[in-house]
Amino acid sequence: MIRLGAIDCGTNSIRLLIADALDGQLRDVHREMRIVRLGENVDRVGSDPERFYLPAYIGARGWFGLRLDRGRINWTEVGNLLELSYCLTAPKRLAQRFEEQRRR
C-alpha cells in the first residue's frame, strides 16, 4: 500500500486529497475543500488599488490589505471584511457559533 496526496490550488478554492493506493485502486483517506477566493481578492485590488493591496508576505495565501490612510474610512465595510475574514479562517465550530450569534 502507498499513501498519496494531492493539492489543487485554484483561484477560488484549494482541495486536498489523501488516498491509499493498493492493487491499482485508490481509497480516500481524507478529502477536503476550502473556499479561499484568491481571484476575488485580485479583482478587488484591481478594481480599487488606492484602497486595497496584496501584502507581499501573505497576499499569495488569499489575504488582501485595506489601506486606512486614504481618505474617509467606511467602518461598516471594515467590520464586514473582518467578520468575513474571521469566518473563513476560524475553526468551523467557532465560525458557526459566530454566525448563529450574528443572526440573533
Image: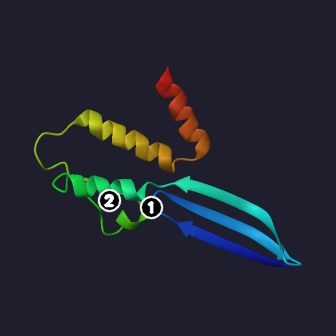
Q: Determine whether 1 is above or below 86 in the image.
A: below
Q: Which colour scheme is used?
A: rainbow
Percent x, y of residue 97: 56, 33
SS for callout 2: helix
Mark 1: few/some/many CA within 10 Å (<14, 14-19, 20+): some
Indicate the amino acid at tag 2.
Answer: Val
Residue at the location (39% across, 58% down)?
Answer: 39
Residue drawn at x 63%, y 64% as measured from the top left: 16
Task: Give the residue pinned by disc 1.
Answer: 11
Pick the residue in front: 97 or 18: 18
Q: In this view, does 70 lie to the left or right of 45?
A: left
CA–CA distance in space, label 2 to label 1:
9 Å
Residue 34 vs 6, above or below: the answer is above
Q: In this view, does 11 lie above or below 7?
A: above
- Can residue 4 be seen in this snapshot? yes
**Which residue lies under the disc numbered 2?**
42
* Residue at the outermost front position: 24
Q: Dividing the picture into quarters, in which one does residue 73 lie? A: top left
- In percent of width and height, residue 21 lies at 82, 75
